[in-house]
């Protein structure tokens, strides 16, 4: 099983990348949260529950208008959490179609300016990174050869 020290070692190499983004990819219950808790325990990594932080900002905005504000709100959340490393957990909110954002682009944009580790609840199969199942309205799929960021397939690390 991949341990926090291995994630930290890989994360240190982010400085050399254009997108300083590391995705921890795996299904719910596969150990992402344990790794995140361990790497954040020394306070060198700033933890953000993106679902909670973003939903608090969006709660008073009508659903039809949320797409206009989401990027600014995410920028505010990132600014409010200074430090060298940012760890984003519970990122599922950015996959909601009503927000009209491209989830990977949001994460890569953050990774341009901050070293970022994000817990991606999904899978890597047959050369594709996915979120949700194909029948689900929030389903997305990306070719791993075109990600332009680092990733750890937590399913293979078990």
Image (cartoon, rainbow, N blue to C red):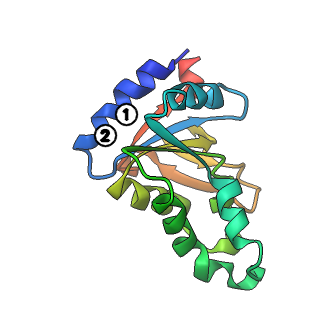
Element at label 2: helix
The answer for how far apart the CA atoms under marks 1 and 2 are is 5 Å
| Residue 2, image x, y percentages | 51, 18
From this view, report whether residue 113 is shown above or below residue 3.
Answer: below
Q: Nearer the viewer, residue 127 or 1?
A: 1
| 10 in relation to 52, above or below | above
Q: Position of residue 45 (x, y in %)?
A: 46, 37
Q: Is residue 103 visible?
A: yes
- At mark 1, the secondary structure is helix
Residue 154 lies in quadrant = top right
Q: At x 55% / y 27%, what residue is drawn?
A: 41
* Residue at left offset 53%, top offset 20%: 157
Measured as percent of width and height from the top left, residue 69 is found at 60, 79
Q: Which residue is mark 1?
A: 11
Q: Quadrant of residue 108?
A: bottom left
Give the residue drawn at x 76%, y 57%. Answer: 136
| Side of 129 relative to 84 (left or right) | right
Q: What residue lies at 74% left-to-right and 62% top-to-bottom?
A: 137
Q: Is residue 42 above or below residue 56?
A: above
Which residue matches tag 2? 14
């Amino acid at each position: 099983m991949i341990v926090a020290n291995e994630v930290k070692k890989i994360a240190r190499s982010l400085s050399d990348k254009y997108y300083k983004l590391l995705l921890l990819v795996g299904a719910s219950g596969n150990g992402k949260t344990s790794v995140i808790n361990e790497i954040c325990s020394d306070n060198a990594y700033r933890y953000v529950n993106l679902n909670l932080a973003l939903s608090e900002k969006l709660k008073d905005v009508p659903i039809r208008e949320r797409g206009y504000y989401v990027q600014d709100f995410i920028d505010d959340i990132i600014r409010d959490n200074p430090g060298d490393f940012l760890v984003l957990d519970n990122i599922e909110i950015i996959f909601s179609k009503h927000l009209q954002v491209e989830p990977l682009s949001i994460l890569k944009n953050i990774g341009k300016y901050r070293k970022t580790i994000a817990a991606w609840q999904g899978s890597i199969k047959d050369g594709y990174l996915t979120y949700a199942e194909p029948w689900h309205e929030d389903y997305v799929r990306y070719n791993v050869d075109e990600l332009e960021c680092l990733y750890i397939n937590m399913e293979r690390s078990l």
